[in-house]
Image: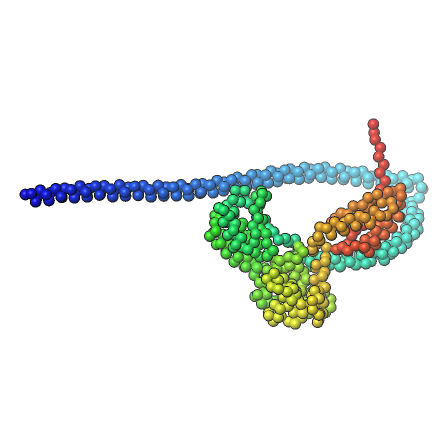
Amino acid sequence: MLGKERALKQAHVIRSQAQEEAERIKREAEIAAKDEVYQKREAFERESQEIRHELRQFERRLAKREDTLDQKMDLLNKKERYVETLERTLATKRSEIEARESEMQNLVEQEKLTLHKVSGLSQEEAKKVVLSRVEGEVQHEAQDLVNKRVNEAKEVADVKAREIISLAIQRCAADHTAESVVSTVELPNDDMKGRIIGREGRNIRAFERATGVDLIVDDTPGVVVVSGFDGVRRETARRALEKLVTDGRIHPARIEEVVANTKKEVERIIEETGKQAAHDLGIHNLNPKEIELIGRLKFRSSYGQNALQHSIEVATLAAILAAELKLDIQLAKRCGFLHDIGKAVDQEQEGTHPTIGADLAKRFDEPPEVINAIAAHHEDAKAENLYTIITAAADAISASRPGARRESLEKYIKRLERLEAIATSYPGVESSFAIQAGREIRVIVNPDKVSDKNAQQMARDIANQIQAELNYPGEVKVTVVRETRVVEYAR
């Protein structure tokens, strides 16, 4: 009995301990469950807050676009009303002019009848008298005019010849775009700058490391600057940053993913650009690597002149010159098209771009004429055929034509100052102004000191002095203004 009671007591103790253990386990499980639910709730709230923030930003962008569209619609409506007003005004003016023309015609007929009555001559007899008198005067004036025009033609023959050549060159010239070493990316708001920089600058460092360019985030509102000498890298960085800004998710992993995809996209653009340029010029049988290098020239510039457009223009000019000399047009075009191919990789290899380009042409089994044209178009090597001379001439024409390349600001200002100094050095000149980027000089003279005849001579002398003393692209127009102003005041 004692053993049984003892066993019952132990069983009761064990059951009590088991119940307490179960309660403890239950409480711990409940606490753990509550913690997990709390953590998930916090994560959900953070994610919801981010989504709401992005939605608010998206709503602000939409509102801004709607405001812009409303402004454009208001402007269009104003322009439509203005055009309607102009049309009504023109219709009124047209009616007035037609009425005046009819009135003038009637007056002329009346004057004819009056003259016929006064002179006593018939209409045919009056015509003969007037025509005979006018004919003698016109013959004398015509002879003077012919002599004057002949003398002027002799004086400006060289200038006109250069003008004709310039116009012919412009007919075949490719478009040029001024290039620099920076690109800008617009931001929807300044809050985006903080996201681009990232916590402790990790995002901007990841971006610069992935693209190989510098990203400048300063106080300029709504804009960041992508800076780098390599045009392909700079274009890749610009496109990648625009995608990241549009997407809104900016973190190191996302940056690497977007930059990798953008690099592939730019490579496709380079290949398509090279193929399109070769197709437009009708140049075939190019090595795929040559096409890629030509496409890279789209993102290369020299003194602000786009290298690809320059190569296209040189190819076109070389073909024209070859046609005039009865040479192989296709071969000349190929020489001009590939003459600057070394510029696509001259930032990665040592040597001048003609030397690098000639080595590449040898590697691609180009004809000897093409290789020599590339190597010698800057006289780094000896010209061995006419195609090299044609390529060098076309290259010089393309580079030196007005507007092809940018001058330094200091040189440009000195040229304008010298133009004005030459003009004001002549007696009787009151003031002078260089306009049209230095392509025209306006000279204001004192009408009491300079006659009309002297003004013509002065314009010719100034033009000759400018031509002898200055170097400039294209031509400079000299305009001498002589006028008399009479002013009175009504009191």
Q: Nearer the viewer, residue 400 or 103?
A: 400
Instruction: Tell me where residue 212 appears, x and y as whole percent.
Output: 55, 55
Most distant residue in the top direction: 491
Q: Quadrant of the C terminus?
A: top right
Is 301 rendered above or below residue 23? below
Q: Residue at x 81, y 48 (%)?
A: 421
Residue shown at 85% from the left, 58% from the top: 154
Residue 452's spot in the image, x, y percent? 88, 46
Q: Is residue 374 above or below residue 250?
A: below
| Numbered disc total | 0
- Colouring scheme, one of rainbow, by chain, secondary structure, one colour: rainbow
From where the camera sits, is residue 334 visible? no
- 194 horizontally vs 432: left or right: left
Q: Quadrant of the N terminus?
A: top left
What residue is rendered at 87% in x and 39% in y? 111
- Looking at the image, the residue that sits furthest to the right is 120
- Residue 172 in the image: state x and y as whole percent: 69, 59
Left or right, 307 with respect to 66, comes to right
Determine which quarter of the picture holds residue 233. bottom right
Query: Residue 201 location in percent, x, y?
Result: 51, 48
Asked if residue 148 can be seen in this view, the reply is: yes
Closer-to-camera residue (53/173): 53
Classify 486 as above or below 443: above
376 or 202, which is in the foreground?
202
Residue sitting at the far left: 1
Residue visible at 56% across and 50% down?
215
Query: Between 484 and 46, which is closer to the camera in this rendering?
Result: 46
